[in-house]
Image (tube, rainbow, N blue to C red):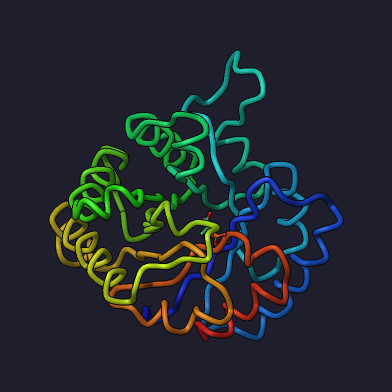
Amino acid sequence: MAERPYIVGNWKMNGTRAMLAQARSIDRAAQNLMKVEVALAPPFTLIHPVHREAEQIGVGAQDCHPLPDGAHTGDISASMVADAGAKFVILGHSERRQNHGESNALVREKGTAAIDAGLRIILCVGETEETRDDGKAESFVTRQFKASLPETLASPEESLTVAYEPVWAIGTGRTPTVEEIGAMHRAIRATLVELYGEAQGTAVRILYGGSVNAENARELLAADEVGGALVGGASLTAESFLGIVLAAA
Ligand code: PEP
């Protein structure tokens, strides 16, 4: 595992102000677990409230628009989430790719906008079950990753985190084997080194995401080249999320 594992909770479309108590508990516990970097990506409406509560944990958004402003009813720009206190944005999540038809090109545009707004990005990639069954998981993910990255990244080791999230493992209770995770993370690492060189390419963290919970976290986090976890369902209560944080400590 990485020297300082990064555990990020993605609350998806869950949470009203009542959930701030969970964020508070997570933040308090994180203050005693400095060996782990902990962050939450609540829905847009809770970014500022969580930011105000948080002394230790990082706060991020789950999406942003590719343009800085304009006539885009209902959309939120990167500078808006930064203004609300976000330090990063999750981009290219498979739920956005599937439910909102987001292409690699759009994810790339959003990433560029996020970097321009001073945000770090967590770029999600992952194959469907069909692609894995066809034996094409690594070539698919490598292509998807390259096509979704912002064109230029001055300091990828600071501004980029990659999250490998097999689509078929998200919210299903199913996970790849430790060997499969390691093989995919090595392929992503090789691509990072090819693109950014040895020093910067090896410094970018690669998270695993997909049905991580307090019981399986230790084993999954021990897979080759895994620098932490992106956690959905199990991040919704402080108890289950902190179980994963503890497993990473
Ligand atoms: C996710 O959606 O990013 C995720 C990993 O979800 P879950 O942990 O619920 O599988």
The spot of residue 208 in percent (x, y) is 41, 65
Q: Nearer the viewer, residue 22 or 181?
A: 181
State the image quarter where residue 163 is shown. bottom left
Locate residue 192 relative to residue 72 in the image: left or right: left
State the image quarter where residue 169 is shown. bottom left
Q: Residue at x 72, y 72 (%)?
A: 238
Locate residue 192 relative to residue 173 in the image: left or right: left
Q: Residue furthest top?
A: 71
Q: Residue at x 31, y 40 (%)?
A: 148
190 vs 246: above or below: above
Give the total number of marks visible in the rendering.
Answer: 0
Locate residue 113 relative to residue 77 in the image: left or right: left
The spot of residue 2 in percent (x, y) is 37, 78
The spot of residue 17 in percent (x, y) is 84, 52
Q: Nearer the viewer, residue 46 or 200?
A: 46
Q: Nearer the viewer, residue 118 or 98?
A: 98
102 vs 164: above or below: above
Q: Residue at x 49, y 24 (%)?
A: 67
The spot of residue 239 in percent (x, y) is 72, 77
Locate residue 235 relative to residue 162 in the image: left or right: right
The N terminus sits in image quarter: bottom left
